[in-house]
Amino acid sequence: MSYVANTDAQRQEMLERCGVQNISQLFDGIPRSLAPHSFDVPPPKSEQEVVALFDDLAGRNYAHLTTFIGGGFYDHYIPSAVDAIASRSEFYTAYTPYQPEISQGTLQAIYEYQSHMCRLTGMEVSNASLYDGGTALAEACQMAIHATNRDRIVVDGGVNPVYRKMLDCYTANLSISFTEIPVTRGQSDRDHLLAELDENTAAVILQNPNFFGVVDNHSDIVEACHARGILVVQSVYPTAMALLKPPGEIGVDIVTGEGQSLGIPLSFGGPYLGFMTTTRSLVRKMPGRLVGRTTDRNGKESFVLTLQAREQHIRRSKATSNICTNQALCALRAHIYLCLLGRSGLRDLAKLCYAKTCYAKSRFRAIPGVDVMESSPTFNEFTIRVPIDAGDLAGLLVERGIAPGLPLGRFYPGMQNYLLVAVTEKRTKYDIGTFAEEMESLLRQ
Amino acid sequence: MVVDERRFSKTHEWIVIESDIAVVGITDFAQESLGDITYIELPEVGAEFEQGAEFGVIESVKAASDLYAPVGGRVCEVNSELAKTPEIINHDPFGEGWMIKIKNFNAAELGSLLDTDAYEAQINSEA
């Protein structure tokens, strides 16, 4: 069955009106050297054949593995109610609705999402969300540049290397210079970092817990930065915020992060959820949509997009950012997830992750030849040193049904023997024990 | 309404010279066109601008516009009242609604600005 709506006769009529003989003449403006020689489209398949093809492709995924992979994206349990509520037709759109007359429900949901993110991070304002954790961090850099009229960003080496790559890519055509400060023993190198600060520095970018899983109290860095008019941007793991001191309490200026852990399934390339919160004084430099609560002319509570003069459709080339939408559906999922867990539920969940991580560490400590990096506290992720190449070890464990973590050699030269291990509430004591036993038996061979 | 001794830029800023200091704001026509002003971003004392450079941003319920320095110079005072109550600009654009004071300006640059008649002619043609 063809889905082309117009008939041959109608097409002929349109071509005549355009003054051409056939459709290919419409493309005559494209140089022959740039035109495709053939589209090489395979012959059509029936529905049954298409389902079989995709079943086969999906079957090649290693979806059966017990995963201990983290590195910014975590395998948390997603309550069924998240799917059930998010897929209701009243909500189910990826677009940001901006007409308050017809979008009160969605606008209220976004407003509530913003309230969650403010509470979780201890900050005053949140935007309606951004694409993902990495782009949110890049937007925070631009925001800091605009707010300070300076052009240099100092990046701690504990910031997710994937994000650091995204920063380079996202800002390649802007005049921002980045200086990276390598970590020492998995922690921010204070002396080196503070020595790099100068009058051109707009912001310092930190991550907590950092990429190695290390939990840090950055308040000394915040203090040193503020004394020199430098802003502090902190990228955080929202689940960990239930247990750690929120960035707002230590004076961080801009908080960003990846919201995937809040009810969004792991998938290759997303869609994920970037969040950003900041202080009231920086709100007009903030990118993205922002929902506010107000009253209509009858005195009824209502919700609207607000502070739009920052945005492209009003400020044109001088807008704070090119972002003119949000990640509505993923933000909605995060909102539903946080409502379902509640304050104490999220804290219980975080404690569970932490306790299981402590158990995993104790199991790994007992394995001869394996060192757990112990220099600082961690939340649900930690780094271990193994006696063989961590990539090779991961390959062997995958054959035994376990994805043991992220080998660090590809991100940090010289760390070929290091593995980053994440433990969520979904991993049972049995899973952790099996992982430890399998690793021990492999290393003994 | 336009006051006599002032000079005006084509971008609707006014300037008045008080001995060696130039006081800058936006005109009644400008505040009227913007509507209710909700926010203003002004430079810090000590900031230096060339003639025609952006020195701030003004935001109303309808629009956001840049503010342009009618003459170059160094900012020696900023009207800090406007941060809390930007609506002063709506009520008294030529008086309490002044924005910045500029020192060390180049008096020759005043010559490129409009006098009252020329500015009124401009706004009549825009209106």
Image: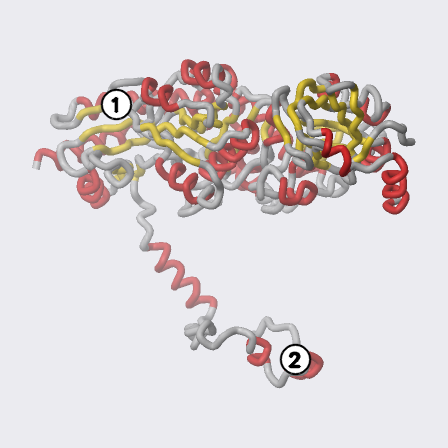
Tell me which numbered mark, 1 or 2, is placed earlier along the sequence.
Answer: 2
- Callout 2, which amino acid? Arg
Marks 1 and 2 on same chain: yes
Neighbourhood count class around disc 2 (C-alpha, 10 Å): few under 14, some 14–19, many 20 upward: few
Where A287 sits versus B17, above or below? below
| Marks 1 and 2, how far apart at CA | 69 Å
The answer to which image quadrant residue A362 occupies is top left
Q: What label sits on residue A11 in the rendered view?
A: 2
The residue carrying mark 1 is A185
Q: Nearer the viewer, residue B45 or A423?
A: B45
Q: Residue furthest left?
A: A445
Residue at x 16% of width, y 27% of height: A370
Would residue B87 be visible to someone looking at this image? no
Camera-near label (1 vs 2) is 1
Q: Secondary structure at mark 2?
A: helix
- Callout 1, which amino acid? Arg
**Relative image position of residue A171 (x, y in whole percent):** 46, 42
